[in-house]
Amino acid sequence: MYNLGDFQKLIIKRFKSNGAYLGFKDIKNEKIDILLPKKEILESDKVGDEIEVFIYKDGKSRFVATRKKPKISIGHLEVLEVTDISKIGAFLDWGLDKELFLPFKEQSMKVERGKRYLVALYIDKSERLCATMKIRDYLTSDSPYVQGDWVNGVIYSINKEYGAFVAVDKKYDAMIEKKDIVGVLEIGETVKFRVSKVKKDGKLNLLLTNISYMEIDENAQKIYDILVNNGGFLSVNDKTDAQKIKQMFCISKSSFKKAIGRLLKNKKIKFESDGIKLIKEM
């Protein structure tokens, strides 16, 4: 009846003090009408109007309508930020007042507050909308790409033996092999890749772009220069808050991690307990 987790066109049936009640044009049953909260009613709204709303459930498992456009809907993948972690799971910001629940059993790794992860939206056995990080079954292998194409992909899993698994366009299954990984990749990160191979099953093999190489070198040099100007030590590392990194180096945390990965690999720096220290000049 109602398209839980998706958009649907419904009719305004009546107005009450708490908002407008919506339902189907040909069904007269007030018990199944659902609420559009008062704060979302427009001055122009009137009984009989057809409006498009997103359908979800409130904290009491009641159907609720909203005009707001959430960041994710059923059948789609999206990168969402963890806003809180409880004893039963994590909660994600998906653009609605009621945060989206990510159960522990649907986490493919331990998540951290403030970090972003690629998830799918599904309906659990209790008919609640929840998120899952186990998204491989949501990906397809029928992409339009061929060898040599440039693509955008979100890293959704990293395996130390095989490499990084990527969702191209948040739709297509792909991977970058361990031998082709440059610097430090981070789960939830969006990266530009080049398609190196389309396998028989349609899945894509990827390579990092040449631009990534250049950016890593430039950022590594920038961090190195700041280290030199600060006496060879900085109280930052891969655990430092992303905002502090942006203020110090004008780059993202993922770019910072790639750059210090390059400096570590080239034995230009080393980790101290509370920061990074210069080993020798370039």
Image (spheres, grey):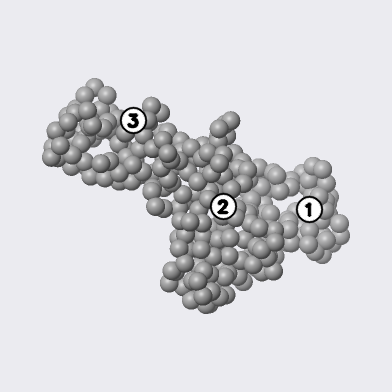
Residue 62 got which mark? 3
Cβ–Cβ below 8 Å for labels 3 and 1? no
CA separation in Å, label 3 and label 1: 56 Å
Q: Position of residue 41 (x, y in %)?
A: 25, 33
Residue depth check, mark 2 versus mark 3: number of the one nearer the observer: 3
When the figure is inspected, residue 103 is found, relative to residue 156, above or below; the finding is above
Quarter-wise, where is residue 27 in the image? Answer: top left
Q: Position of residue 102 (x, y in %)?
A: 51, 40
Sequence order check, earlier mark of 2 and 3: 3
Q: Residue reaching furthest bottom?
A: 147
91 or 83, which lies in front? 91
Residue 107 got which mark? none
Q: Residue at x 47, y 59 (%)?
A: 139
Sequence order check, earlier mark of 3 and 1: 3
**Residue on which the image places disc 2:** 188
Q: Is residue 107 left or right of residue 40?
A: right
